[in-house]
Amino acid sequence: MKVNKLKLEIEKAWNQKNSCTDNENIKNIVIQVIDHLENGLIRVSDFLNGKWILNEWVKKAIIMYFSVKEMNVIELGPLEFYDKIPIKNKFKEKKVRVVPHAIARYGSYISPGVILMPSYVNIGAYIGEGTMIDTWATVGSCAQVGRRVHISGGVGIGGVLEPLQAHPVIIEDDVFVGSRCILVEGVLIEKGAVLGANVVLTGSTKIFDVTNNESIELKRIVPRYSVVIPGSYPKKFPSGTYYVPCAMIIGKRKESTDKKTSLNEALRTHNLVT
């Protein structure tokens, strides 16, 4: 079934609030959508006409998938799981390197050339070619990760299935995300950006560009080729003034600069320590 037809059927079933468990036709349509996600034929979010567009109907299909599937025992050698969604497999055919104990759920798309260290990738996520997901990193539901991205150890990329209108976390091509960063609530990390260790970005986190004489405040977006470190700023409360977390853009890396080394170069340039 063509994608446009699948979209119409999913919207129809969602609006009519039909029970997926009682309608074999809806079951089959939902499963087709998840199969398309699995094979990279559709995505939760697409880059069209210079901006990211949310495919809300795909998120609806994922939510409906939980109703379609039944709980099953999943055995992997001596390990046992009990869940509704199968575990992704056939990585050799997909040309994906997977180090034990990396786990990816069915309905996520992982491109050829990706390396999964012991990590977790949830349903609806998309990972582009040549990307590294390092040890104990998590890629949440529907998160979109571009090509040649390095997700360092312990990074937490939040998932977003509900509310339906909420955009997923999006990380564009050639981004470097330092250890223990947390990215949630639909933040957008544009092409070539470098995030230092422990940067936390939520939908309300203030991002200050301090590269000029006067700072510029941003939210939800890290511009292309920005170099970002964690910081704090004073905020008044009834009991006094306290420092709350923020992120600071301290420089820009050159497009030609290797993303793995540019953070240290930027820190040295600004006399900052790692």
Image: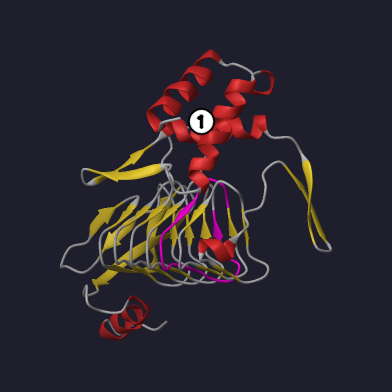
Is 129 part of what is drawn in magenta?
A: yes
| Disc 1 target residue | 60
Say what amino acid the circle numbered 1 marks: Lys
Tell which residue pokes out farthest to the top in this image.
16
Residue 7 position in % (x across, y down): 43, 27
Q: Predominant secondary structure in magenta?
A: loop
Residue 202 position in % (x across, y down): 44, 51
Q: Is residue 142 above or below residue 179?
A: above
Quarter of the image for the C terminus: give it: bottom left
Residue 249 seen in this snapshot:
yes
Front residue (pair 56, 211): 56
Front residue (pair 181, 123): 123
Front residue (pair 271, 227): 227
Is 90 part of what is drawn in magenta?
A: no
Crowding at dot 1, Cα within 10 Å, few <14 / some 14-19 / many 20+, comes out as some
| Magenta segment | 122-139
